[in-house]
Image: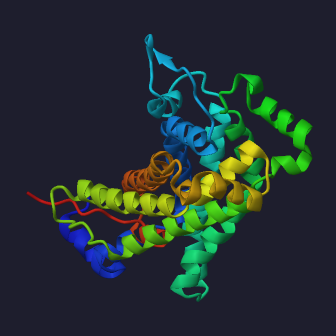
Amino acid sequence: MSRTKEDCLESEKEYGSTGETQKMVAAKDYPAEYFAASALAAAINYPLWRASAVGQSGFVVQNLHVVGIRLPQALSTYVYGFLPPYKGLVATVGGMTYARAAIFWGSDYGREVLLSHGYNESVSMVAPPLVVSTIVQITNQPLIRATITLQDPAPQKELRNVMHAIRYLYKNFGVAGLWHGTTVGLFKTVPKYITAVVVKDYMEEHLPQADPSSPTYHYDRLERSAIKSATAGIIGAALTNPLDVIRNEMFKTHHKMVRTVRDLQAEMGWSWMGRGLGKNMVAVAIPIACTIFFTDAFIQWSAPRFHNEGLTKEELMKRKITLPVQPTN
């Protein structure tokens, strides 16, 4: 049965305002959308991640030629990220997909659960990404270590694939070597995702809602999501760049964190804190922003399908689905 504009407006009165309805979308109903968004963002941004890993680790790309032209050193790292062979592509994309899907879905679902149990907004917003990103970082650390080590273009350490890199690390540094850099990884990853999630949720609460009566309503919702996503990605990446530098330098030198910071300070002064910042803003801010935006877009596309499948108003309310208003001419 088709719904008129009046039916939709009446439903809004029963559910709450349109803005409130949109924020009621339950994460537990959309795990596939979170996973698909994370996978798409990871695949698109693999070359950017690769360029960032090379730049922040201090790996040197020498004598890079494209169509017979030797590239200047300033451009070589960026271009290298886009050129084959794409070492560790499947493992990197898989690891990023698991990490971001778990963090963003777990954070949104965890917030719903904590709020329903009476916890305040601050605890409900911060605790889930703190717990989930910590677990993800620890379980993902050997894969992170191997995929970054794999990107070193130095011919004396030519590693073919992720398993070869893991065997190399284990042979030379033991089991502990696979988790080398976990502490600084936690210092970097956990604040980054807490910041991104908090900024995302804050902007979701405070950005003006799209007008359901507008003929461009669905596009307006996507534009709103783009602003929210970009802001969350940029702030999360910028605040944690120094920790990225420390972690990647530890991977390259295999030194402890304190010595790594001391060596960076001695070699570069305070400028080390900004090393690779441009690459990091591209390789971290864009994937986070893409993940948040694609998730919103996939959920926006999926939600009306429940209505089209003939669910009753009570079922829609139970599932907390937003019913878009179709403007009349």
Residue at position x 44%, y 70% in the image: 199
Q: Is residue 1 left or right of residue 127?
A: left
In percent of width and height, residue 295 lies at: 46, 54
Residue at position x 45%, y 26% in the image: 72
In percent of width and height, residue 4 lies at: 20, 63
| Res 329 quadrant in image | bottom left
What is the image's colouring? rainbow
Q: Is residue 252 above or below residue 213?
A: above
Q: Is residue 89 left or right of residue 23?
A: right
Q: Is residue 229 above or below residue 120?
A: above
In percent of width and height, residue 218 lies at: 26, 56
Residue at position x 36%, y 69% in the image: 22
Q: Is residue 170 left or right of residue 222?
A: right
The N terminus, quarter of image:
bottom left
Q: Is residue 235 left or right of residue 213?
A: right
Residue at position x 80%, y 29% in the image: 164
